[in-house]
């Protein structure tokens, strides 16, 4: 009996170590995809053989095209896990991504850079495999915590990547960040190969009913809107800070500070909400956090200065960040890799939709309309998730988290 307990403890420790290094791998992917974003427009202007107007058009395609491709590719990567072992797919995706970064740093052809970025978008869906590996190795009761760690690792990569890339490009030249991205991904690949548990190809679950399908749509929509909350602001910060009468130089510095503060708040809020869900239940925490995010979104319009705006934005990011991993965790046990891929694709759709929605609505209707639209979409998706989102096919929802050890 003691031997059995010892084996179970060892298995739990191995699983926890594996999840940790899956999260490390996700940090590596998040870091690499974002470390080039801060200087990429300048790099494209430097290497372009086109005039300025054409280069700007190429820059838009190169900067934005990969997120939409990743949204389409994420379910595809998940479906592959029914035929190929997930760990092999995960490692292949990281290795290929590293090679693409290396090639991108040594080419001056904008069409080739665009092709590489679109291929990166396809490979960006490999983060779905990380979710499949977590769902396949972690006890159901720990899924919210582990998926929260996965999400926080991604957010940390997004936070740390841009300043590292910018400083590396400034001090060592534009090729340096691409080489750094390769080194980071190679390190993540080594730890993944060494410590992440291999699991067999994941069969499709049987018996998923219509309520699950409706729940997936509601959950997917809530993930999209949650990501929009996190991603809409940077594209319109110049206009917002101009409204607070900041000079251009001060506004640039303040924009970086605001982004760092609310991204840090998102990491902390994510961890706290995932912990809170273990005592209150997953779905009540999702509902409370989404409603609070709506309130803070509307309060942004009433900000009287930069300090007030930053505080409200930090609170908003802190509560909405936990919604995304909790929605995924609430549905992860009831679906296949394709299900996880579908849910994960919501992050990529939100990444692309957030800036486009923000700039369009601000240009044509103003800030109040933008804030109310995001809040309204959040309420609509929360209602859809609450009405149809709870699986009724044998306990893959929050109740199973409470019952299973």
Image: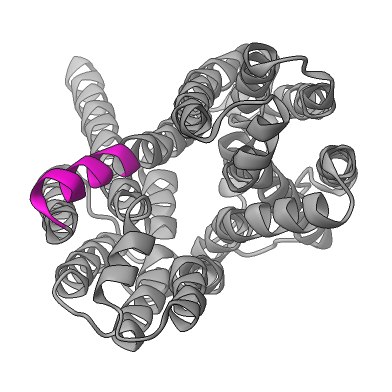
144 and 229: which is toward the camera: 229
The single residue placed furthest to the front in the displayed view is 247
| Percent of width and height locating residue 394 | 70, 46
Q: Residue at x 55, y 55 (%)?
A: 344
- The range drawn in magenta is 162-173
On screen, residue 231 above or below 182:
above
Left or right: 179 with respect to 97? left
Q: Main secondary structure of the magenta part?
A: helix
| Percent of width and height locating residue 366 | 86, 45
Left or right: 230 with respect to 200? right
Q: Residue at x 57, y 61 (%)?
A: 345
Taking the image as drawn, is residue 396 in sight? no
395 and 166: which is toward the camera: 166
Taking the image as drawn, is residue 208 in sight? yes
| Percent of width and height locating residue 377 | 85, 46
Q: How many marks?
A: 0
Q: Quadrant of residue 120?
A: bottom left
Q: Quadrant of residue 51?
A: bottom left
Q: Residue at x 78, y 47 (%)?
A: 392
On screen, residue 54 above or below 235:
below
| Percent of width and height locating residue 13 | 23, 26
The quadrant of the picture occupied by the N terminus is top left
Left or right: 103 with respect to 18? left
Left or right: 121 with respect to 237? left
How is the model colour-coded?
one colour
Q: Is residue 255 magenta?
A: no
229 and 325: which is toward the camera: 229
Q: Is residue 163 magenta?
A: yes
Q: Residue at x 65, y 24 (%)?
A: 313
């Amino acid at each position: 009996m003691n031997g059995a307990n010892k084996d179970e403890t060892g298995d739990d420790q191995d699983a926890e170590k594996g999840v940790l290094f899956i999260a490390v791998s996700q940090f590596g992917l998040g870091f690499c995809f974002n470390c080039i974003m801060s200087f990429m427009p300048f790099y494209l202007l430097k290497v372009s053989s086109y005039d300025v107007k054409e280069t700007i058009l190429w820059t838009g395609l190169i900067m934005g095209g990969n997120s939409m491709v990743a949204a389409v590719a994420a379910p595809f990567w998940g479906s592959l896990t029914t035929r190929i072992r997930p760990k092999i797919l995960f490692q292949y995706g990281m290795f290929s991504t590293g090679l693409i970064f290396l090639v991108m740093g040594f080419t001056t052809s904008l069409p080739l850079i665009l092709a590489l970025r679109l291929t990166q978008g396809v490979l960006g869906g490999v983060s779905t495999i990380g979710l499949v590996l977590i769902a396949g190795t972690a006890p159901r009761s720990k899924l919210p915590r582990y998926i929260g760690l996965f999400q926080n690792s991604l957010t940390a990569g997004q936070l740390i990547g841009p300043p590292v890339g910018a400083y590396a490009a400034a001090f060592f030249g534009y090729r340096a960040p691409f080489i750094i991205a390769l080194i980071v991904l190679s390190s993540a690949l080594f730890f993944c190969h060494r410590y992440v548990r291999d699991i067999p190809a994941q069969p499709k679950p049987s018996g998923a009913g219509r309520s699950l399908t409706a729940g997936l749509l509601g959950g997917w929509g809530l993930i999209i809107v949650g990501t929009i909350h996190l991603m809409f602001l940077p594209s319109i910060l110049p206009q917002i800070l101009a409204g607070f009468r900041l000079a251009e130089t001060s506004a640039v510095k303040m924009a970086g500070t605001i982004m760092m503060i609310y991204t840090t708040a998102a990491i902390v809020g994510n961890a706290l909400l995932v912990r809170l869900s273990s005592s209150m239940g997953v779905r009540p925490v999702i509902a409370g956090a989404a409603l609070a995010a709506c309130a803070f979104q509307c309060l942004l319009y009433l900000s009287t200065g930069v300090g007030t705006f930053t505080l409200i934005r930090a609170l908003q990011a802190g509560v909405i960040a936990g919604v995304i991993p909790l929605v995924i965790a609430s549905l992860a046990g009831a679906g296949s890799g394709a299900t996880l891929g579908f849910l994960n694709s919501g992050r990529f759709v939100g990444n692309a939709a957030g800036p486009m929605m923000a700039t369009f609505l601000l240009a044509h209707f103003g800030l109040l309309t933008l804030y109310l639209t995001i809040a309204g979409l959040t309420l609509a998706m929360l209602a859809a998730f609450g009405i149809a989102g709870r699986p009724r096919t044998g306990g893959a929802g929050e109740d199973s988290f409470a019952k299973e050890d």
